[in-house]
Image (cartoon, helix red, strand yellow):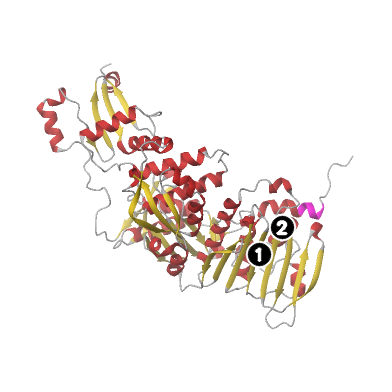
């Protein structure tokens, strides 16, 4: 009995759609890519119900004639490449001819298109079982694609879609990425008839950065710019004093294609390692332009990853560009790198500097006991009282009845504040004398407004204030001195984590814990703050009363005890 059979075309297309079309944002991405390849100068995106009901993308690009409009729905029909050798010299965003047939296999599609100067356009409707209707349309240059009822015929895939706000968040991220990569193109985004984004054609990346993220946030970024014979990089990296609790606002573009790439990401972290704490993250938007023959863009079904011919050259070049941006006056000599072992075993680079105007952060730090602390020990008084001594910038130590206690003061205070926020104790909310207006990026604004009732439960009273601005009217006393914009950005990043990983339970407890941890981090004392003995005594007492005193909300130790037996073993006296 024959066991092997050839699958029907409709089923083949549905299987292929699973590789290319994961969610509504995937459809938006593919349609925008087609519009960009068609040399559009304006792209309008409209979605309804988070893209579940409708996705409509219109452009004023070159359009298609009747024959091409029919052919574009066939698998592997493309105008981008014609021969095998062109596969390794890709200069367009689309090239495989999979997107439109994949979309048409799992949704109801209407395509309207016309070329410049034509007397009539073409309208094609593809419904259930790929039944087609074709008619003439007005000769309006460009292409409009309407996608309705995504995954209507694949209910197993449809049930894996997230909530409308979550799917909308992914669509916003996609449109923002595309708009950022192509500042000369005007973009708009509407959801349920409401305009969320209106970004006119910009004169360059810096202007587009301000359009998408606001003037205030744009001012927090340094320009990254470097070129060589084989590649060029432009973009932005956050200043060392503006870091993130998570990996939000990290974008990599290779030949204007948004990708995830470990080589470039590691190079950025390696260049930032002196100025950012280990538990914080830089924000960056980097645009690498490289010879298409030196990068393979055909290694991922959704084209999210690329493979470089010589990744070590990319790492060296990107790291040098970011380091120079963070250290004005420094110039990296790329001809004399010294390889070192990096995080995760990656071979990073220590850069050779032609000139360095100032020492690196922490170069002249003198960890240990201060002169007054040394005098205290010498006086013999340490035998009678138990003061706290600062060890380096992050730790404090004290003698206990049975040994030595070493505390990470930031982690300890973070645990205390985390439990207070989570239990909503000691969170008296106070009205601000002057309400504070904060401008947020579009995606973060949408997330914060969506969860404003939850934030109100933490004592943060905020509301919409026009555009992408929120107005904060009251705060808990514990957050009076916090960086409120940074706090809201980190809270938004926590919401993204929950919705991306799909771990949010119906009770919302996971999100509450995530936000409480981020609020606690902003409120907690920094490692570099030197507290007095009385303040430290109160902190240690509060830590002893915590439910989980030995670790911070992120799982790091808050304190380490060394007993007399431990010390004796260390000194080989036992």
Outermost right residue? 1
Q: Residue at x 40, y 29 (%)?
A: 548
- What x and y, as percent, mark residue 114? 70, 76
Q: Which residue is drawn at 53% across and 61% down?
A: 177
SS state under label 1: strand
- Asked if residue 97 can be seen in this view, the reply is no
- What x and y, as percent, mark residue 151? 71, 52
Most foreground residue, 523 or 306: 523
The C terminus sits in image quarter: top left
Q: Residue at x 37, y 35 (%)?
A: 415
Specify whether residue 77 is painted magenta.
no
Outermost top residue? 574
- What x and y, as percent, mark residue 387? 19, 29
* Residue span colored magenta: 8-12
Task: From the image, tell me which residue sits under label 2.
Answer: 102
Outermost left residue? 379
Task: From the image, tell me which residue sits under label 1.
Answer: 56
In this rendering, position of residue 290 left or right of residue 535? right
Most foreground residue, 147 or 265: 147
Query: Quadrant location of residue 516?
Result: top left
In this rendering, position of residue 361 left or right of residue 349? left
Query: Quadrant location of residue 278?
Result: top left
Magenta segment, principal secondary structure? helix
């Amino acid at each position: 009995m024959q066991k092997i059979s050839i699958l029907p075309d409709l089923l083949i297309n549905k299987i292929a759609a699973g590789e290319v079309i994961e969610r509504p944002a995937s459809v938006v991405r593919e349609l925008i890519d087609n519009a960009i390849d068609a040399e559009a100068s304006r792209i309008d995106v409209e979605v309804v119900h988070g893209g579940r009901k409708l996705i409509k993308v219109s452009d004023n690009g070159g359009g298609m004639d009747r024959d091409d409009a029919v052919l574009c729905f066939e698998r592997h029909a493309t105008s981008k490449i014609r021969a095998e050798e062109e596969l390794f010299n890709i200069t367009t965003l689309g090239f495989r001819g999979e997107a439109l047939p994949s979309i048409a296999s799992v949704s109801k599609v209407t395509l309207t298109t016309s070329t410049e100067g034509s007397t009539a356009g073409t309208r094609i409707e593809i419904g259930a079982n790929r039944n087609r209707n074709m008619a003439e349309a007005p000769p309006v240059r460009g292409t409009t694609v309407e996608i309705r009822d995504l995954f209507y015929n694949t209910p197993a895939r449809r049930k894996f879609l997230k909530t409308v706000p979550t799917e909308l968040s992914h669509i916003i991220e996609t449109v923002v990425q595309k708009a950022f990569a192509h500042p000369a193109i005007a973009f708009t985004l509407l959801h349920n008839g409401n305009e969320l984004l209106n970004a006119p054609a910009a004169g360059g990346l810096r202007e587009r950065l301000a359009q998408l993220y606001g003037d205030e946030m744009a001012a927090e970024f340094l320009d990254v710019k470097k070129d060589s014979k084989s590649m060029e990089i432009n973009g932005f990296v956050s200043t060392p004093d503006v870091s993130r609790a998570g990996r939000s606002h990290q974008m990599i573009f290779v030949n204007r294609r948004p990708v995830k790439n470990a080589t470039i990401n590691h190079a950025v972290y390696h260049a930032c390692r002196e100025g950012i704490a280990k538990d914080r993250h830089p924000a960056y938007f980097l645009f690498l332009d490289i010879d298409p023959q030196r990068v393979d863009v055909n290694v991922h079904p959704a084209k999210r990853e690329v493979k470089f011919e010589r990744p070590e050259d990319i790492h060296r070049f990107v790291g040098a560009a970011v380091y120079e941006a963070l250290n004005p006056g420094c110039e990296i000599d790329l001809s004399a790198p010294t390889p070192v072992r990096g995080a995760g075993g990656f071979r990073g680079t220590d850069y050779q500097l032609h000139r360095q105007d100032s020492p690196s952060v922490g170069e002249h730090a003198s960890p240990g006991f201060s002169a007054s602390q040394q005098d205290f020990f010498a006086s013999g008084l340490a035998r009678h009282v138990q003061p706290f001594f600062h060890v380096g910038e992050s730790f404090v130590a004290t003698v206990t009845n049975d040994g030595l206690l070493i505390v990470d003061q930031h982690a300890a205070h973070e645990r205390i504040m985390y439990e207070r926020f989570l239990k909503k104790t000691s969170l008296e909310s106070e009205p601000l004398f002057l309400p504070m207006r904060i401008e947020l990026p579009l995606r973060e604004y949408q997330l914060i407004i969506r969860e404003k009732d939850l934030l109100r439960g933490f004592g943060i009273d905020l509301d919409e204030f026009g555009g992408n601005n929120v107005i904060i009217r009251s705060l808990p006393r514990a957050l009076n001195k916090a960086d409120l914009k940074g706090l809201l950005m980190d809270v938004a990043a926590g919401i993204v984590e929950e919705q991306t990983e799909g771990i949010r339970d119906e009770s919302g407890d996971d999100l509450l814990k995530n936000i409480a941890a981020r609020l606690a981090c902003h409120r907690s004392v920094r490692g570099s703050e030197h507290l007095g003995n009385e303040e430290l005594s109160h902190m240690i007492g509060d830590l002893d009363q915590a439910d989980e005193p030995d670790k911070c909300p992120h799982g790091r130790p808050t304190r380490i005890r060394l007993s007399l037996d431990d010390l004796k073993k260390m000194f080989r006296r036992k």
